[in-house]
Image (tube, rainbow, N blue to C red):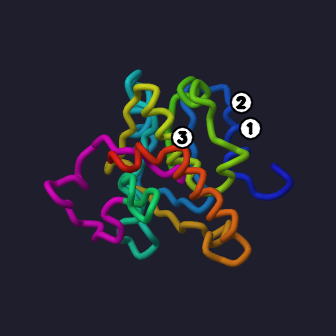
Amino acid sequence: PCPGPFNYSAINNRAAQEAKGEILLLLNNDVEVLHRGWLREMVSHAVRPEIGAVGARLLFPSRRLQHSGTVLGLAGIAGHDMLQASRKSPGPHDLLRMVRRVSAVTAACLAVRREAFLAVGGFDETGLRVAYNDVDLCLKLRASGLHNLVTPHAELLHKESATRGDDMSPAHRERWLTERQIMRERWGEAQARH
């Protein structure tokens, strides 16, 4: 239990502090496992010393692609690569079939070594309480010399924001705009390069 206003960053930072294992798995409560072996796949990459965050291939309930890596600069800050592609699509140059480096991955399903997470300070729980905290974490991991990966061999269903609501709703919009501005100020140069 984590009473008070919803703060994804604080919830996960608290969990990371209390965790005993070497690998942290962030997994939203609106994610559904589709196949066996997904966790082994993610952990097999996360344990590698040169790797930061490892993301999964996430599908919308319609079975179209929701997440297979995050690209800086899309939608002004960062966005999901090849959004809404068919589940069977190989993507350009078979990219959707490869384990590959990406700028960032979504924390809806993210594996990372606890040591690496803590070394970069975890999530920003004051400035990025809800949005962009995963992109910020991945950029901090990358700035520390680690590589972020996404694997298509860990595929799950994600009912995005089913429990926390839409950032564009009147109740959340001001917070979201503030978080966007923080990302622009913090990572503006990185976003322009990639």
In the figure, 127 relative to 165: above or below? above
In the figure, 42 relative to 7: above or below? above
Q: Nearer the viewer, residue 149 or 41?
A: 149
**Mark 2 or 3, nearer chain start:** 2
Q: Nearer the viewer, residue 140 or 41?
A: 140
**Secondary structure mostly taken by the magenta-highlighted segment of the chain:** loop
Disc 2: which residue: 17
Q: Nearer the viewer, residue 184 or 141?
A: 184
The magenta-colored residue range is: 81-108
Mark closer to the observer (2, 3): 3
**Mark 3 or 1, nearer chain start:** 1
Q: Percent x, y for residue 36?
A: 41, 49
Q: Residue furthest right?
A: 3
Q: Secondary structure at mark 1?
A: helix
Give the side of residue 59 with respect to residue 161, left or right.
Answer: left
- Which residue is pictured at 67% across the width and 46% down the height? 9
Disc 1: which residue: 14
C-beta proximity under 8 Å, tags 2 and 1? yes
Q: Percent x, y for residue 87?
A: 30, 67
* Few, some or many residues within 10 Å of mark 2 (<14, 14–19, 20+): few
- Which residue is pictured at 34% across the width and 44% down the height? 102
Q: Residue furthest left?
A: 93
Q: Amino acid at mark 1?
A: Arg
